[in-house]
Image (cartoon, rainbow, N blue to C red):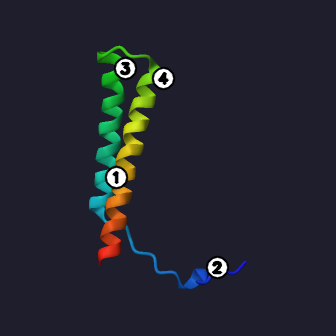
Amino acid sequence: MFMGIDERERVVTPVSRLTVASYALLLVLLFAWFLYGWLVQQQGLVASIGEAAGSGFAILVIVSIVGSIRRARG
């Protein structure tokens, strides 16, 4: 199947350390948010997982929108 760009011609840019560190920090904060909801607020386990997952997806959507805007401008 022809995709337009040969796989050998694709330019792959490396991911910066700041990006990896940001995603790692996000993961730690979401896990802390899960533990806070589950242990401190004493929500149910499933509710706490859902709240942390929903927060993570919302943050990733915001990051995606900002990245698309930045890519379109420059």
* Front position among marks 1 and 2: 1
Which label belongs to residue 3? Answer: 2
Q: Name the residue nearer the viewer: 21 or 40.
A: 40
The reply to whether dot 4 and dot 1 touch (C-beta < 8 Å) is: no
Q: Residues within 10 Å of mark 4 (few under 14, many from 20)?
A: few
Q: Residues within 10 Å of mark 3 (few under 14, many from 20)?
A: some
Which image quarter: residue 47? top left
Q: CA distance from mark 3 to mark 4?
A: 9 Å
Return the residue at label 4: 46
Amino acid type, residue under disc 4 in the picture: Val
Amino acid type, residue under disc 1 in the picture: Ile
Q: CA distance from mark 2 to mark 4?
A: 41 Å
Q: Residue at x 34, y 51 (%)?
A: 23
Return the residue at label 1: 62
The reply to whether dot 3 and dot 2 touch (C-beta < 8 Å) is: no
Q: Which badge, 1 or 2, comes first in the chain's sequence?
A: 2
